[in-house]
Image (spheres, grey):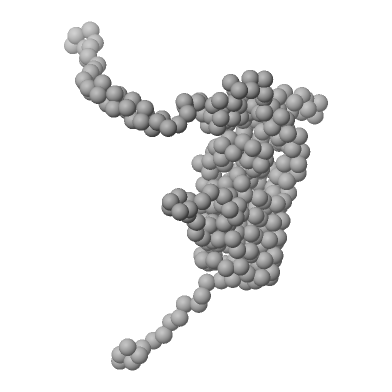
Amino acid sequence: MSPFKKIVPVRQDHVNWSLSPIVAALRDLRASDREGRETPCKLPSRRALVRVMEGFGAVLFPNRLGHCELTHEGVDFFVGHTLDLTLSALLRQIRLEFTFANPDAAALEPDADHAAPLVATLAKALPKIRALLDSDIRAAYAGDPAARSIDEVLICYPGVVAILHHRIAHELYRLGAPLIARMIAEIAHSQTGVDIHPGATIDESFFIDHGTGVVIGETAIIGKRVRIYQAVTLGAKRFETDAEGALVKGGARHPVVEDDVVIYAGATILGRVTIGAGSSIGGNVWLTRSVPPGSMISQAQVRSEQFHDGGGI
């Protein structure tokens, strides 16, 4: 046997893909897509916003979503330092949104920075957001017999991840950064399967159990102590169009869910209807009308009849 190891050449797949015409065709399509629009600007970064939301999680819950080894004396320093970095990163993304929405603004108002006051206002709202999240986490713990601790709820439950993102996104949406807000909502959607439009208004002690497949539309209003389960949809019944057939944007088109309502798995509620306080909506119900407070709505009973010797046919 030869003492020299046989050298096997590595296969090199150098294929001529003839890329030039493909690149040219894509360039032409980009050029035609830009016709009639402003010069394209750089969009906010989804990756940067993922890091921003990780920063906000660490600021709001430093010992559970930040560093578990923080000392009592070091928590405030960690929160302050992390918040400064997070707000600065968010500021850069919001400036990109504003430039994208109005490319001429920077040239017309070089000294105006509308993004900085917006971010400062969001920062001041963080104690309110933390209080709302505390109520959401307590509601999840109280509403699920499988929950063993508040900490478990915070770090494990997808519904809590979704509502944490929503509380931040809703504030940004309300303050005038709808694109950033929508991107944050979609980050949560991809992580949890819960799709909450940042325009939806959700009061305290909100609990989404299991979470996957939940959809909550832009103009939905949800009261206090509401609990919903997986695959629930709070959607629009129909979409109005203008004289040219284009969808009319805006307008209240999603449900209002009052306090202390429970909506079970698979229920679909459509249109600007009101679910009265204290109501219970059963699983897989299809509902397009308002119901008064204290209602118990379930599926229609399945009718079963037996026929003998062709009777009744």
Q: Is residue 265 above or below residue 244?
A: below
Q: Is residue 6 left or right of residue 176?
A: left
Q: How many marks?
A: 0
Residue 199 position, x and y percent, is 61, 46
Residue 19 position, x and y percent, is 26, 22
> From the image, which quarter does the N terminus lie in?
top left
Residue at x-position 69% and y-position 49%: 136
Kindly give the residue lying farthest to the front in the view shown. 243
Q: Quadrant of residue 54?
A: top right
Camera sees residue 114: yes
Kindly give the residue lying farthest to the top in the view shown. 3
Camera sees residue 168: no
Kindly give the residue lying farthest to the right in the view shown. 73
> From the image, which quarter does the C terminus lie in?
bottom left
Residue at x-position 54% and y-position 61%: 270
Residue 176 position, x and y percent, is 64, 37
Q: Is residue 283 left or right of residue 145?
A: left
Residue at x-position 63% and y-position 20%: 110
Residue 83 position, x and y percent, is 70, 27
Kindly give the residue lying farthest to the left in the view shown. 1
Which of 242/31 is in front? 242
Which of 11/223 is in front? 223
Which of 44/2 is in front? 44
Q: Is residue 294 above or below residue 197?
A: below
Residue at x-position 58% and y-position 21%: 107
